[in-house]
Image (cartoon, helix red, strand yellow):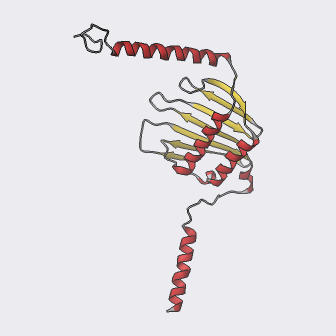
Amino acid sequence: MASHRMLLLLFAVVLSANCSVAPKPSLTGERHEISEITLQRSGSWGLKSEYRVTFRKDGTAEYQGDVHAKLKGKYRGKISNDQFEQLARLIIANDFFSLEDKYQALLTDIDMVTTSVVYAGGRKAVEDFGRGGGERLTQIESEIDKTAELIAWETLNEQATKDQQRSLIFESRTRLSLRNWLMPMKGDNSEAGLGS
């Protein structure tokens, strides 16, 4: 009877050891040497922003945004060693290198996020279509976005500023046109400016 209890106890210990929640990083020494981290967001069929941000261990940062992104055009900046190392530690802690190369949610009109990491042994990229990659990948994506918001970006071309100005003018005119079309003028008995 005591041997059955001991065997049952041993089984429970082995089972609980294998059910730990925190991932154990599947790293070799070379994967600790992260030199570049890139995140690219590709918009959906709707009007979602598309941009790409790259951070390098040497402190350089690059950003490129399309017409729907907060920053439009090409930019450069600097990332501190602490900021880069914090992202690298998160990538290692969340066991990025053991993730699948592609995740896909069942939805269709959603964005795709590609996260790639360059390390001494090569490059690992993970495509996350519709946030199908789970919490660990989403946390990495979110932290890269947050870090990008902290960078003091400098424009690489004057065209980006001109495009931003044109975009703001177009958006303002579009909103004004829609408001005038949707709101009938005083004394106008037609519905929403469509006539009777």
Q: Quick one: 166 or 178, which is closer to the camera?
A: 178
Total marks shown come to: 0
Q: Residue furthest left?
A: 196
- Give the image quarter of residue 71: top right
Q: Is residue 165 visible?
A: yes
- Residue at image position (49%, 44%) is 131
Q: How far from the left and from the top, in percent, is residue 102?
A: 53, 46
Q: How far from the left and from the top, in percent, is residue 37?
A: 67, 41
121 sits left or right of 4 in the view: right
- Residue at image position (65%, 25%) is 74
- Residue at image position (37%, 12%) is 180
Q: How far from the left and from the top, in percent, is residue 81?
A: 76, 42
Q: Residue furthest bottom?
A: 1
Q: How far from the left and from the top, in percent, is residue 110?
A: 46, 37
37 sits left or right of 136 in the view: right
Q: Quick one: 2 or 102, which is closer to the camera?
A: 2
Q: Is residue 1 above or below residue 23?
A: below
Q: Residue furthest right?
A: 58
Q: Quick one: 20 or 173, which is closer to the camera?
A: 173
Q: Is residue 35 visible?
A: no
- Residue at image position (49%, 46%) is 132
Q: Is residue 17 above or below residue 194?
A: below
Q: Residue furthest top?
A: 187
Quadrant of the drawing holding the C terminus: top left
